[in-house]
Image (tube, rainbow, N blue to C red):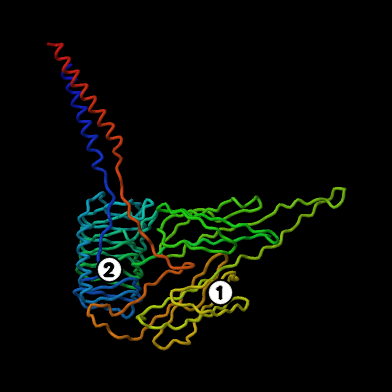
Amino acid sequence: MKKSYRFLSLTLVLLLMITMIGPTVSMAAETTLNFGTAESFAILAGSTITNTGTTTITGDVGLHPGTIFSGQDTATVIGEIHIADAVALQAKNDLTTAFNDAAGRAINTTLAELGGKTLTPGVYSSATSFQITGTLTLDGQNNSDSVFIFQTGTTLTTASASKIKLINGANYNNIFWQVGSSATLGTNSDFKGTILAAQSITATTGANITGKLLAMGGAVTLDNNNIINEMTTSITVKKIVTGDTAGIAIPVFTISVTGPDNFSESKEFVHNESFTWENIVPGTYTVTESRTTLNDDWTVSGEGAIEVIADQVNLATITNAYAVDVNPTPTEPTPVVPTPVVPTPVSPLNGSLTVGKIVTGNITGMTLPTYEFTVTGPEDFIVTRAIANNSSYTWVNLIPGTYTVTESRTGLNSDWTVNGEGAVEVVSEQIAVKVITNHYVGTTTVPTTPTAPTETITPVPTTPVPTTPVPSIPQTGQSTDYGMATVLGITALLLAGAGVISATRRKRFDA
């Protein structure tokens, strides 16, 4: 009996210890990396930058200590270029700090082939290399602050046509690839996140990158790529009413939108009205309409989930159809075959066309000219309108078909170039978008400060109706519930005490 009580007491004490220390091992959420002055760079290299073909880079470009950016003449850089200057040097130093931070994060899971997997936030590691074949899905679990860190001892390689898909609020700004040597992105692959490579990075033909390519010691090689380090997210909801509504009072329609990070907003709409919610987190949103002001004569379609993707036009169209039940009556007392009333035919639903204006180049201190557009289309449609920089205008109720957008050259000298003119297809119940870009290639006075940028180019905004959004990213963490641990701990102490007292009394009786 003595041994039994002693064993019970020891067991309860151990249970108490395990209960008390259990919550301390809960895994906290990873925090993002701090890139300092390197944050704005889409491309950063050590030795050289080499480009082939018409690559587009949205973000700054930096090189240090190297001095050669070959193929720069066929690359479009929407940002600043810093070659072997103090700005590039500081960005490289800040990159080194971020690289060491990523390499030092505690590992949650060890993997090698990432294709075909769906991963949640955390730190993933491979002592040798990472490969992506097919689709890698990253699930943000409805938290835009969720962080994914991938550590590889040597290389990162993605296959041709491979893809990284982001769902449930996963954000490319919080995805980091710390590479021990070099990274290679396959032909026509779709890559998301920031690569921090100790040596070099190669983006093969047609690879698209949403994020940054940052090489500490070696080269960055490009080939007809699209690199975007600045994105915006929005959702546009459009209201359409169909049916024989002549002579009736059309009600006001209330539409609600809910999504990640507890997003929930409502707005009243009238027929053919659109509204855009801006600066929202990418992810799955739900669009619903209130039935409060609608009787049984109304039906609704278009509600449900919509996947909102960064830097794209995300459109949800809610259509209400009005249809009255007709009960025909005989014209004679004698039963006759009733003649149904034929509803008035409804004409095909029309579409909309949004034309946006963007001006790039070193335009500091300039008085910009007036930009005049002419839109022509089916049934002799022709209209002319002036649109200012960073503005847009939407023509509604357009007959579906091919429209042509041209810009007048009046007021523009040879220092200006224009891109984006031409044909655009207007589709029923959709918003077609056409963006006209004017780039100023004239020379200006060189700033006196050696380290100042030699070119300032306004970042390209997206063109959803009516304005360009910018994403906002809140910060959250995780918490641990100690309530049950405390109850179990107190219970274990009471049981242990009872065991010790019982053992003492038993010893006296035995004596």
Report the amino acid beneath label 1.
Answer: Thr
**Label 2 – label 1 distance at C-alpha:** 40 Å
Q: Position of residue 233 (x, y in %)?
A: 42, 63
What secondary structure is found at the residue carrying circle 1? strand
Mark 2 and 1 residues: CB-CB less than 8 Å, in contact?
Answer: no
Q: Which mark is residue 77?
A: none
Crowdedness near tag 1: few (<14), some (14–19) or many (≥20) residues, C-alpha within 10 Å: few
Q: Position of residue 287 (x, y in %)?
A: 51, 55
Question: Does residue 207 appear anywhere in the picture?
Answer: no
User: Which residue position holds label 2?
Assistant: 202
Res 115 quadrant in image = bottom left
> Nearer the viewer's eye, disc 2 or disc 1?
1
User: Which residue position holds label 1?
Assistant: 402
Q: Position of residue 377 (x, y in %)?
A: 58, 76
Residue at (61% x, 52% y) in the render = 293
Question: Does residue 116 appear anywhere in the picture?
Answer: yes
Q: Quadrant of the C terminus?
A: top left
What secondary structure is found at the residue carrying circle 2? strand
Residue at (17% x, 18% y) in the render = 503
As drawn, the residue found furthest toward the bottom would be 413
Vertical position of residue 455 compared to residue 502: above or below: below
Report the amino acid beneath label 2.
Answer: Thr
Residue at (34% x, 69% y) in the render = 227
Residue at (53% x, 54% y) in the render = 303
